[in-house]
Image (spheres, coloured by chain):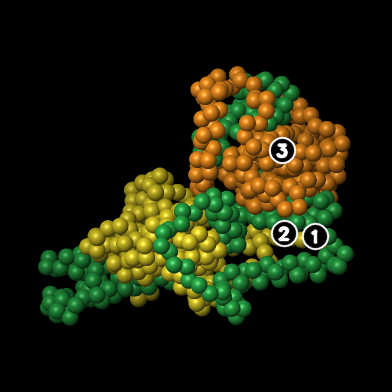
Amino acid sequence: MDAVLTSPMFLPAAAESPVAAAESYETDSTGDADLVARCQAGQSQAFETLVVRYRGRVYAMIVNMTGNDADAWDLSQEVFLKAWRALPKFEARSQFFTWLYRITHNVTYDWLRKRKIGNGMEFDDAMGQTPAAGAVTVPHHEPEPDTRLRNKEIGGRIAEALKELSPEHRSVMLLKEVEGLSYQEIAETVGCTLGTVMSRLFYARKRLQTLLRDVYESQI
Amino acid sequence: MNANFPHDMNEELMTRWIDGQLSPEEQVSVNRLLAGQPLLGREKQAALHLGGLLRTHLPSTLEPPSPDFFTSRIMDEIRASSSMPVAKNVKVPAGTPSFWSWLKKPWFAPLASAAAVAVVFAALNGPHSNPSPSMETARIYAPDPNVVAKAFYSDSAEATVIDLQGLQPVPNDREIRAFDLASSEPAEPGQPQVFYAASAPDRAAVVLTSGTGQAPRLRELP
Amino acid sequence: MCVFDVRIFKMKSLLLPLLVLTALHARPLPVSAQEKRPPEPSANAPADAQVQGLLFFAANDATAPAQEEKVTVDAALLKSMDGKLKKVFPFSNFHLIGKHTQKVFKEYESWVVPSKDLCLKIDSRGPAEGGGVNVHLQLWQDTKVLVKSDSVIRPGQPIFLGGPNWRGGRLIFVVMLKP
């Protein structure tokens, strides 16, 4: 009998496992600091735990920034490999995930710059596509079909509006509103001052409010 | 609904006002400035609603497709490079994790899933089957979300099969340019690689150039 | 498509031998000169395996597509492969249209190019337990990567990659260890 494995979720049992696994990570008692210390001592298994713990957040951030699922996979890989190489220099002055977000931001920003995606620049057709088949959002829920359609429309509008922002404004907006980072954490992540973070947030919000006015006014 | 903000309020102050990050003193003075300007109150509500909209429709966590493959590729690269510069004066937390703590480990769930799959395979193939090592190791990822890729090991053909469905067909009017090439020495990174004809080992037939992560460019030689 | 590569770091360990080789073989030749140069008689870099990439056009039509270049392959191998392919893909004819035999080198990207339209990038991950070689594969069609895979190529056990449809049939890429 031939055994069949299917991609993207090529292990049949894995179809449900990412959500369950993501939830179990939160109860994992091993803190980031301990895992980082083990990594710095050369224990690559500890890094595997960090990859599993943060791959979803890194991948989501890159998908939101680039709107390009296929490249997001490779870029996320690049983030973790860069993190591994840079770990010896990590001094735990900031939290691991903030530091990882900074690498994520740099990798994504470089990619966007190379692709010249941004405000007023050429834009990739892939932007605003729905997540790749097999990508599982957390939390996972199944809304009604008409709600799903409406959500998809709104999601598409948001993705379209985000691509109208410059990468600098887009990343600050996503880090604040989606990731829930503080001004200080955002400043560390993108490498700018607190004042610049607030200023970028101000203008990004104004621009998005203009672009998405009909969407949220219909809901207020 | 964009309102004009008072000149005394700069972008920083406005942002902290929207996010509820003002100090009590600042709050008092901002309240004074905004008194009698209900449009600004609506502006704040709109900004907060916008944040909610983003949180609802953009994922903060999204498992990458083929998450196990995602992780194993990284770990393979790390182990292949095998030169982690170890930081100095690092204290490694001691202690062997107990069995129960293993259950909580992040790798336990995927490992358990993989083990469960292996058990299912064993059950389906029966006690006399001789599972091929290839079956366990073909891990695949198709970047195009429209493509469904399946990997399986065919016992009858003794072959690993990676089947790609949903690919754009090659147009019928297009000719497939195929070659018969012999082995060539590797090129240094960034340098073009020259392939020679199998039938005439001194005849350069094809030049391939590719950068890291870039598509190959093939040039056929006359 | 952006794919990371740490090979440049691995290359450091090869720097000295490369410098020696460079000195022995004089300066790297420009492409035009390289094109005239015959292949090196022996492998200068350590090879993990020698693989054969075969491109088949699977169809129910017995007429093979017209090809500019005639592809030659061992008849017994062709017969064996025909039998294997028939057990997997629902076609009655498997026309071999392209072939490339290539050593797979450690530390280098290896390309198997039986066709301008479909080619395979192979990164060797070293010998596999129980025989064969661990590889990372990327199947490319023009500028697009169709699939990535971590696989093992074992002796006598080819990997079939079912590619795009064409002219009522299908293009199938086969990669195997060269006997």
Q: CA distance from mark 2 to mark 3?
A: 23 Å
**Left or right of A74 in this view: B203:** right
Question: Type of residue at label 2?
Answer: Glu
Question: Type of residue at label 1?
Answer: Pro
The residue that mark 2 highlights is B136
Residue at position x 63%, y 31% in the image: C44
Asked whether residue A212 appears in the rendered view, the answer is no
Q: Colour of chain A?
A: yellow
Residue at position x 60%, y 80% in the image: B100
Mark 1 touching mark 2, by CB under 8 A?
Answer: yes
The residue that mark 1 highlights is B131
Q: Earlier in the sequence, mark 1 or mark 2?
A: 1
Q: Residues within 10 Å of mark 1 (few under 14, many from 20)?
A: some
Residue at position x 63%, y 63% in the image: A9
Q: Colour of chain C?
A: orange
Q: Nearer the viewer, residue A22 or A166?
A: A22
Percent across and percent down for residue B31 are 15, 78
**Left or right of B138 in this view: B142:** left
Secondary structure beneath label 3: strand
The residue that mark 3 highlights is C50
Instruction: Check if mark 1 and mark 2 are on a common chain.
Output: yes
